[in-house]
Image (tube, grey):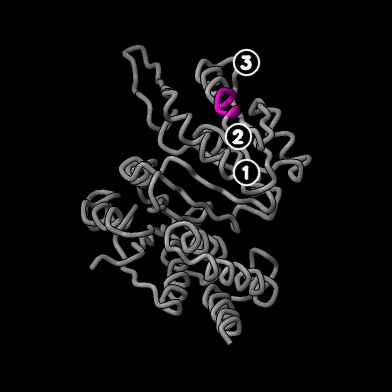
Amino acid sequence: MAPRVACLPGDGIGPEVMAEAVRVLDALGIEHAEYPFGGAAIDALGTPLPDETLAAARRADAVLLGAVGGPQWTPGACEQGLIDLRGALQVYANLRPAANLLIVRELVGGLYYGARGTRPDGTVFDTCEYTPAQVERVARRAFELARARRGKLMSVDKANVMETGRMWRGVVSELAADYPDVELKHGLVDSVAMWLVVHPEEFDVLVTENTFGDILSDVAAGVTGGIGLAASASLGDGTLGVYEPVHGSAPDIAGTGSANPTAMLRSLALALEHSLGEPEQARRLEAAVEAALGSSPTPDVGGTATTREFGEAVLAELQLAVA
C-alpha cells in the first residue's frame, strides 16, 4: 500500500525541517515514506526527479517537499526537478497564505513552461504563454476560495502592455458573472506590489499568473512576518497536492541545527486540510506552531531554540491539545 504522504527532503536545510514534519506525522499516525529529490537525487541518481520519486508522488495523497538547490549544483538544475514535478502532477493552483490574505498563483504555465532558447546572434528568450482554459481553471479556484473567505478577489495582470495580460483579464471578467457574491477588482502587478507593501490588510484573495505570483507571494510574506515562516499548497483538480515552504535551501545554515521548521509544519497543516481530510488536525497543528513560536523561537525570530527543540515544543502542544 502506498504511503499517504511522500516526503521529499531535498537539499540544505530541507532534510532538517522535514525531520520535524516526520515527527508530527508519526505522532498523528499518518503513514509516510521518503524519496530522493533535487540536488541530493542528482548526486545519487543523476537526475533531480527520479522515476521512483515521481511514481511515489503520483500514488500518494500528498507530497511534502523540503527545499532544493545549492552552490554545488548547476544553477537551475535542482529547480528543474521542481518544475517537472508540478507539471507532471498538474498542480496548477498554488496557494500561499500570508497573514490575512491569500495569493493564488497559476503554477504550470507562463514563462517557466514556455518555449526558451538562444538565437545565433546571442539573443536569449523565454516565452510567456497561456490558454484561456488554463486561466479559467485557476481563476475559478480563486473565486471559490474568495467566496469562502471575505468575498473579495483581486486579479493581477499586466494588461496595459502584455497580450497574455489582456486575455487573462478578459477571461476572469467573464467568470465574474458566475460569482455574484464575490467582489472582483483588477490590478496591474506593479501597482499591486506597491499596495501590498503599504496596505496588505486591504487584500483578501489575489489571483495571478506564474511569474507575478512568484514575486508577489514573496513580497506578501516579507511584509506579513517573513519568508522563512511562509507555507504553500499546490493543488490540481483532485485531492493530491504538493506542499512546501516558500523559503529556499539556506545552505549557509544547513547542518547548524538553527533552521526554523515553521514553514514546513505550516505546509503540513495545509496538507492535512486539503489532501488528507484532517481539518481538525490541521487547526491543532497551526495552533501548536503558533504557540511554539512564542515559547521556543529559533534564532531567525529572535530566540535560541534549535530546530529540534522547536519541533519538541510543537509536539508538546499537540499532546496538550489531545489531553
Quadrant of residue 11 in the image? bottom left
SS for dot 3: loop
Kind of residue at disc 1: Arg
Q: Nearer the viewer, residue 288 or 294?
A: 288
Task: Residue under label 2, please give it.
Answer: 179
Could you tell me if residue 113 is visible in this image?
yes
Q: Are marks 1 and 2 in contact (CB under 8 Å)?
A: yes
Distance of mark 3 from mark 1, alpha carbons?
A: 28 Å
Quadrant of image for the N terminus: bottom left
Task: Residue under label 1, please give it.
Answer: 147
Q: Nearer the viewer, residue 122 or 90?
A: 90
Q: Are marks 3 and 1 in contact (CB under 8 Å)?
A: no
Q: Which mark is residue 24?
A: none
Magenta span main SS: helix
Task: Residue under label 3, please give it.
Answer: 160
Distance of mark 2 from mark 3, alpha carbons?
A: 25 Å
Q: If you read the primary sequence from the N terminus, does the residue marked by circle 2 or circle 3 appear first?
A: 3
Q: Is residue 224 above or below residue 314?
A: above
Over which residues does the magenta segment extend? Answer: 172-177
Q: Furthest-top residue in view?
A: 121
Magenta-drawn stretch contains 62: no
Q: Is residue 37 above or below residue 185?
A: below
Mark 1 neighbour density, 10 Å: few (under 14) some (14–19) many (20 or more): some
Kind of residue at disc 3: Asn
Q: Position of residue 139 (x, y in %)?
A: 53, 34
Q: Furthest-right residue in view?
A: 198
Q: Residue at x 69, y 46 (%)?
A: 150
Could you tell me if residue 79 is visible in this image?
no
Q: Is residue 178 left or right of residue 11?
A: right
Kind of residue at disc 2: Tyr
